[in-house]
Amino acid sequence: MEDVRLIGADGTQLGVVSYARAKELAAEAGEDLVLVSDTSNPPVVRIMNFGKLLYEQKKNQKAQRKNTIAQKLKEVKFHINIDQHDYETKINRAIDFIQKKFRLKVTLALRGREMAHQDMAFELMEKVSADLAAYAEADGKPKLLGRNISVNFAPK
């Protein structure tokens, strides 16, 4: 590096100076010489405290991680031969999860000979989808995976 564009500690433009002169000015100020942009012509350097820069960057990254919310998934399980009151209780629980902005997975487990009555199982899942339609959107149609039929819902 021969010449560099120098920015002072207070943010003022000090113009294009030699690299050696920039190092001298940084040493006089008791600060570090930090490369800001190496792609520009001439490269841009700044007089600043490098440790403070690293601290600020870590602090900003920590704040960003704190503000990102991990999308949580809640699950409600059903069976074909569910009683009306139990059905209503599970639907209310599912609505509660959705209103709290959780994603929801509705699973219908088929046991034993229930596998022979998959048509009834899909009818129940359609009923669940219809009851939750006002609160959430289904991420596709119910799918049979092994002995379980499941569908995910995202809050509206």
Image: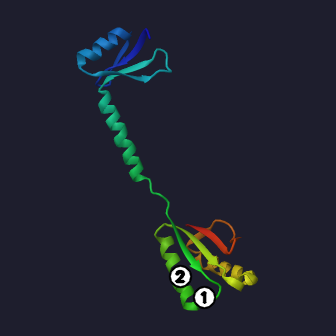
Q: Using residue 72 as the reference point, say whether residue 111 is left or right of it.
A: right
Q: Using residue 10 as the reference point, say whether residue 62 is left or right of it.
A: right
Q: Nearer the viewer, residue 123 or 144?
A: 144
Colour theme = rainbow
Residue drawn at x 66%, y 78% is: 125
The local secondary structure at tag 2 comes to helix
Q: Nearer the viewer, residue 39 or 107?
A: 107
The percent position of residue 152, horizontal first and vertical second, equals 61, 68
Q: Of circles 2 and 1, which is in front?
A: 1
Q: Which residue is mark 2?
A: 90
Discs 2, 1 touching: Cβ within 8 Å: yes
The percent position of residue 7, horizontal first and vertical second, equals 35, 20
The picture quadrant where one finds residue 91 is bottom right
Q: Which residue is mark 1?
A: 82
The percent position of residue 133, horizontal first and vertical second, equals 61, 74
Residue drawn at x 41%, y 47% is: 64
Q: Name the image quarter holding the C terminus.
A: bottom right
The local secondary structure at tag 1 comes to loop
The percent position of residue 100, horizontal first and vertical second, equals 46, 69
Mark earlier in primary sequence (2, 1): 1
Q: Using residue 13 as the reference point, say whether residue 103 is left or right of it.
A: right
The picture quadrant where one finds residue 49 is top left
Q: Nearer the viewer, residue 42 or 49?
A: 49
Residue drawn at x 50%, y 21% is: 39
Label 1 neighbourhood size at 10 Å, few (<14), some (14-19), many (20+)?
A: few
Name above or below for residue 136 compared with residue 60. Answer: below
Amino acid at the residue labelled 2: Lys
Q: Using residue 21 as the reference point, say whether residue 150 is left or right of it.
A: right
Q: Which residue occupies the extreme front position in the image?
A: 112
Label 2 neighbourhood size at 10 Å, few (<14), some (14-19), many (20+)?
A: some
Q: Nearer the viewer, residue 148 or 50?
A: 148
